[in-house]
Image (spheres, coloured by chain):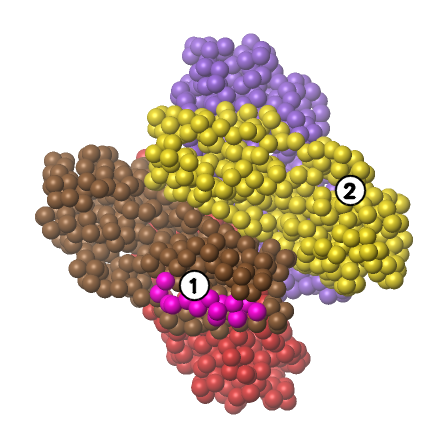
Chain colours: A brown, B yellow, C red, D purple
Amino acid sequence: MRKIAIMTSGGDAPGMNAALRAAVHQAVVHEVQVIGISHGYEGLLRSAFTPMNLSSVDDIIQRGGTILRSARSQRFCSKEGQEEAIANLWAEGIEGLIVIGGEGSYRGAQALAGMGMATVGVPGTIDNDIPGTDYTIGFDTAVNTVVEAMNKIRDTATAHERTFVLEVMGRASGHIALTAGLAGGAESILIPEIPNNLDDVCRRLKWSSERGKVHSIIVVAEGVASAYTIAEEVKKRTGFETRVTVLGHLQRGGTPTAFDRLLASRLGSQAVEVLLEGGTGVAMSYVNGEVRAVPFDKVFAGSKEIDRSLYNLATVLAM
Amino acid sequence: MRKIAIMTSGGDAPGMNAALRAAVHQAVVHEVQVIGISHGYEGLLRSAFTPMNLSSVDDIIQRGGTILRSARSQRFCSKEGQEEAIANLWAEGIEGLIVIGGEGSYRGAQALAGMGMATVGVPGTIDNDIPGTDYTIGFDTAVNTVVEAMNKIRDTATAHERTFVLEVMGRASGHIALTAGLAGGAESILIPEIPNNLDDVCRRLKWSSERGKVHSIIVVAEGVASAYTIAEEVKKRTGFETRVTVLGHLQRGGTPTAFDRLLASRLGSQAVEVLLEGGTGVAMSYVNGEVRAVPFDKVFAGSKEIDRSLYNLATVLAM
Amino acid sequence: MRKIAIMTSGGDAPGMNAALRAAVHQAVVHEVQVIGISHGYEGLLRSAFTPMNLSSVDDIIQRGGTILRSARSQRFCSKEGQEEAIANLWAEGIEGLIVIGGEGSYRGAQALAGMGMATVGVPGTIDNDIPGTDYTIGFDTAVNTVVEAMNKIRDTATAHERTFVLEVMGRASGHIALTAGLAGGAESILIPEIPNNLDDVCRRLKWSSERGKVHSIIVVAEGVASAYTIAEEVKKRTGFETRVTVLGHLQRGGTPTAFDRLLASRLGSQAVEVLLEGGTGVAMSYVNGEVRAVPFDKVFAGSKEIDRSLYNLATVLAM
Amino acid sequence: MRKIAIMTSGGDAPGMNAALRAAVHQAVVHEVQVIGISHGYEGLLRSAFTPMNLSSVDDIIQRGGTILRSARSQRFCSKEGQEEAIANLWAEGIEGLIVIGGEGSYRGAQALAGMGMATVGVPGTIDNDIPGTDYTIGFDTAVNTVVEAMNKIRDTATAHERTFVLEVMGRASGHIALTAGLAGGAESILIPEIPNNLDDVCRRLKWSSERGKVHSIIVVAEGVASAYTIAEEVKKRTGFETRVTVLGHLQRGGTPTAFDRLLASRLGSQAVEVLLEGGTGVAMSYVNGEVRAVPFDKVFAGSKEIDRSLYNLATVLAM
């Protein structure tokens, strides 16, 4: 293999640049050329190709976002789009492709693998909702961002003895809400995976209040309900004043944590190794501290459950 | 004067603890006793008094919120409430009172001063909306909190080439929005003091987009409109995808910046000096780098305008 | 078991408070009394006991250091000291003991277990040098602290095109240096586990410089050599200007990261479970994402190697 | 004036990029061309000129360091060097020059002004040691960096009840040490401007220790003595264990604070205005909240004293 391409796709995640940097370095070690594709699959359809070398990835390990940009592509979802895409890759002499993104981006990668392009996925999404890997790139940073927000909210919650509702990302998945809620010391955590009982939340609020605990933070994943809805409902049922914070896309940004940089560096460099060893149709995964290549089929067939023991621990710690 | 009291009142602000610490240290130097009043005027009505010494304020300079807590008091607004309050102060042998808070808290302080209690205000509010002082305690921290959020949002805005709307505090005042918007490199800043022209905002968005600038952040003070309203309207007029972040009360929290700690330490310690020199009915102020005592009447008669030159500069930098 | 005690011992680590909080909550669930021992084994010898309840651990999850304080104790190392210590525990009616600390603290815990006190260790040290566990509490925070320092140093390194030497903790272990060096994008990493070749370091510096890479950061674990020594030597051999930063104990402090809080919460709460189930002479460990109890003997017999693949990756990424 | 040039010179400071960005934007408003000079005066001698437009300064407001790089130049100090430099400027058609840097850089700027080139200085240095301006660009960020380090050190200082010595920048000037020491709650502050009495420091340490204050941080400006020397001396005189941190050049780096970004934006944009209005041989200054142009002669004749009242306040707060 003499020439490979790399792209970032789907929602951006802190650490994507670190993965990109590692892949380029690893390719240079093997004297393999690297082409960067801008704007994900959309850029692939436009042959938005740029050769990359060590200098292209200097001083990006610490940057959030992705220097290759990202975008959604309707056109790529069609068979015609995919044929055009692969033709563009062949025309450029590209023999292998690395796609950094989430499960949606893996679907596109699998399609290209099925059409004969050696393709490897790298799990880049803050949601940590990709089966087959313990962690995705960006999750640790997003969780820390939420926890820092909770640190600040707790100051004013304590000073004013009020109840705060913090809405975090997670349409179908409560990984961010659960992990950050636990680490931030939330009084209640509402996630899509577990039926939520607002009566229970309100009962705990009152109980906390009776033992003199002067602040309460409720973390809610966006997939459960709007923070505004929860805040109103809690006020109606308890009479407590409530306040709302919606972090939104700021959870996607920021300098990646050390954990995400290391994870991204390992997965990005190994993706090149896997390609060079003839691998295709696989996703790089991080399982029990080790890097593995897991077939896309297995990823799609799996599911990424939340850890119930963490949810139970959250209940104990929320007292 | 042998015994003074101190309280925090109204919305909490980072640096209130630093002001409190400085006042206690300064009082100890003069061998004056200090009583801490919990929960603001509400606590005063309940005689929620605690003696404070150097150990009470150890290791609080870096803490957000206020160890004395804060609250609103309806009862204190009435003449009867105020008479009860001052009776509680006399009963405790308190000869001077320091109130750390915003303009609303100053009104209460002035009432007590009018009834014979030596009373001094210290400007503690993130809004920077108190006339007569260049800065209020907490403003610099709140602005930095917003700017850090913008740093993160810019990462993902750049990666996805989208328009973000960030709602910040400021019901009647655009100080936070203007200062943070400028420092954070916002493309548009919407504040209550200046009639907003969404057409103008949209025109700039399109123009930026044409010259290839791939992200746009619109900062809006909550007093202008909800970020959700702005986001929808912009999308309708430009066709650009928009995203919303509402920081809410997390702007009140966090470790105070060096600037706020220093400001708080100077104002808090000087408040004690002013009391001991016989001052009353005055607010500590920071003007041109110096600490002064300004009569409450002058504060209430003044107005705290935004700096139009900053607004113009923002327009130049937003290109 | 009706009454247990808990202490922190050895060098403090961010997350010790989170572990303490989780243990207290878990004990309360089981209606077990908790006694906090101040100042580690030294406090145990002085019967520095304080009953703890939920309120004792409110709002400490985010605090660095340890509210129980820590200290070294010469006296406890002797047989007499240990007998006195265990007598103090019996006298207080304590039936189980949790010790949060490093390998040195585990030795003391094992001694007490051998004398009949049910004792469980929790790995709290920034060095990540305890065999039998993938991570110790505080390591992730310390690594992030070093990486943030590197972010700042890189700014000025780039601006001035200079070589910087950063000395980090690690007398016998290079875990912090290696992980942070990788995540921070260090050009060279010097650790005690691998014979260092300054010629190699200097060759890489020159090579980087030739390809136009304008900054270089050398991370050195304190066990290898003083940063000042390295800086002088590099200057002598390459002629490049060098600058030194010694982070020292600031690596021990700071708000714990989400990872450390979660790890600490899991280990702290499970330590109580293990005690209640009759466990003793064991250390709580985190292996492949799961919490286990590992006998002290096994811990002491093991060794915690650095991951050579990370070292090799560092070499690839340092190009 | 149709074409101006801009450079950064001397030690880099956070906010230099923000000043650069503002100057470019302001020039574009006036349809004036901007040339960026790389590597300071050294680059000027090499005609290291690059045209700059709005895109050149996109997304740099938040970056530490300087995208134009900086360097020292021996050759420029000579008359011949300066004549060559000015010839290079004329050859490029440059009619005005903005130099962002410290007092040393101003000397060069004055020389060029004396030779007929319209030249304006902008105060960029973390040391805050330029007469005629209340603040220099980068000072607020550096102070916050030191204060954050103190936050972390305090955690472990408290846990272990030890004395820490923190060495900060400042060869001839104690501005950083004094401001950060005050804001960080240092027990003692040693600066070049005030004769230091280690006996006094040690007496305070003992007194603090007697009243049970369990940590002590001594901040020392590098111009006074090495932190290692102070630490040894304190240990010898008090018997207390001491620990050392040397922040070094990390004080120069990092994302600029909101204050520095705003200051830089105001000074950078006004520098262009001053040039266009015919100003030369002046330094932009920030005095009592306003931007002014102060002749270099006045700057050189002045002195930037530390504020003794802050030093006295530090003594009160250190109790």
Picture quadrant where residue A103 is located: bottom left
Q: Amino acid at mark 1?
A: Leu
Give me the chain letter of mark 2.
B
Q: Position of residue B29 (x, y in %)?
A: 83, 53
Residue position for label 1: A190
* Residue D152 sits inside the magenta stretch: no
Which one is nearer the viewer's eye here, D252 or D224? Answer: D252
Q: Total marks drawn?
A: 2
| Quadrant position of the N terminus of chain A in the picture | top left
Q: Residue at x 55, y 51 (%)?
A: B250
Give me the chain letter of mark 1.
A
Magenta stretch, residue numbers: A192-206
Side of A62 relative to A133 (left or right): right
Q: Position of residue D237 (x, y in %)?
A: 73, 59
Which one is nearer the viewer's eye here, A164 or B266? Answer: A164
Q: Residue at x 57, y 29 (%)?
A: B194
| Label 1 vs label 2, nearer the camera | 1
Labelled disc at residue D302 = none
Main SS type for the magenta part? helix
Q: Position of residue C90 (x, y in %)?
A: 60, 89
Q: Residue at x 46, y 15 (%)?
A: D32
Mark 1, residues whose alpha carbon is within 10 Å: few (<14), some, or many (≥20)?
many
Side of D160 relative to C163 (left or right): right
Labelled disc at residue B283 = 2
Side of B267 relative to C61 (left or right): right
In the displayed structure, D48 sits above or below A66; it is above
Q: Amino acid at mark 2?
A: Ala
Which one is nearer the viewer's eye here, D310 or D207? Answer: D310
